[in-house]
Amino acid sequence: MNKLSLDGTLWLASDIHLGEHIPRTRQAFYAFLDSARAHANALVLAGDIFDFWAGDDIALKSSEPWLQEALDQLKKTATHIPLYLMHGNRDFLIRHKLAKQINATLLADTVIIESAAGPIRLSHGDEYCTDDPAYQRFRKIVHNPLIQATFLALPRRLRHRLASHIRSQSKNSHAFKNDTMVDVSSSAIKQAFLENTQVRTLIHGHTHMPGHHTLMLHGALYERWVLPDWEYDHEPVRGGYIEIKKSGVCLHRFDLPANAQSVAN
């Protein structure tokens, strides 16, 4: 499994879902990046940074102001502290070209971080939602390298339309899924821990159910931390991050600063 060694204070966030029509969420995230540059030694964005992604070439040549601002903010962050990106279920087509353009590092879908608080397993989290077999079948298809290469070879307009259609279909199907289907399954989490019993902390996002969970396996205590999603344009307002340092792991809410509020308004 891929490993990454990061000393000092590490911040992690995911599920920001950056897009055109969420100005307050974008401003909150940019304020968060300001804080990360000031207080963290490295930042990892664990997937679904963007609401959807149809290809690096489309994004890097886009004239959409919100997208250029987002990329500029990420690049600004990467000039101050190491910035790492992971794939989510909505932006799994991000490639090294985009990461290079903003001076970030694109990580594997699952990585073991050797942190100041000990080893931590990090992933986006959708692979653990095994109680939703239809989604897992879809995930297997779209993660096929041949399927991805075929999609990325399509004309840009067609890719954009297809990505928007898939995202719309996903939102519609989500409304018919119960809580068990949209959350991780206990068997998948146990299997993840048993793959490497020396790594007793797992962090993921995806489910939009932030929290801290413990599990006893063969007499040993394991911990699972879930990153929150970000939403500042509609109620209920929410957003946050996980901080890792020598004293341990902590889940924080991120409040939109007063100056960012005025900009968003």
Image (tube, rainbow, N blue to C red):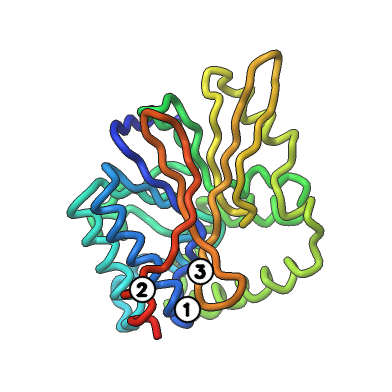
The residue pinned by badge 3 equals 51
Q: Nearer the viewer, residue 52 or 235?
A: 235
Secondary element at image label 3:
loop
Query: Whole-Å distance between the Cαs marked 3 and 1?
Result: 11 Å
Query: Whole-Å distance between the Cαs marked 2 and 1?
Result: 17 Å
Give the quadrant of residue 135: bottom right
Q: Which mark is residue 22?
A: 1
Q: Nearer the viewer, mark 2 or mark 1?
A: 2
Among the two numbered marks 3 and 1 on one chain, the one whose residue lies closer to the N terminus: 1
Residue at x 61%, y 70% (from the top left corner):
236
Residue at x 42%, y 24% (from the top left corner):
118
Give the quadrant of residue 218: top right
| Residue 239 x/y as whole percent | 50, 61
For the C terminus, give its image quadrant.
bottom left
Give the amino acid type for the residue marked by disc 1 in the picture. Answer: Ile
Give the quadrant of residue 156: bottom left
Q: Nearer the viewer, mark 3 or mark 1?
A: 1
Give the amino acid type for the residue marked by disc 2 in the picture. Answer: Ala
Residue at x 44%, y 77% (from the top left corner):
24
Q: Nearer the viewer, residue 73 or 235?
A: 235
Secondary element at image label 2:
helix
Among the two numbered marks 3 and 2 on one chain, the one whose residue lies closer to the N terminus: 3
**Residues at badges 2 and 1 in contact (C-beta under 8 Å)?**
no
Mark 2 closeness class: few <14, some 14–19, many ≥20 residues within 10 Å: few
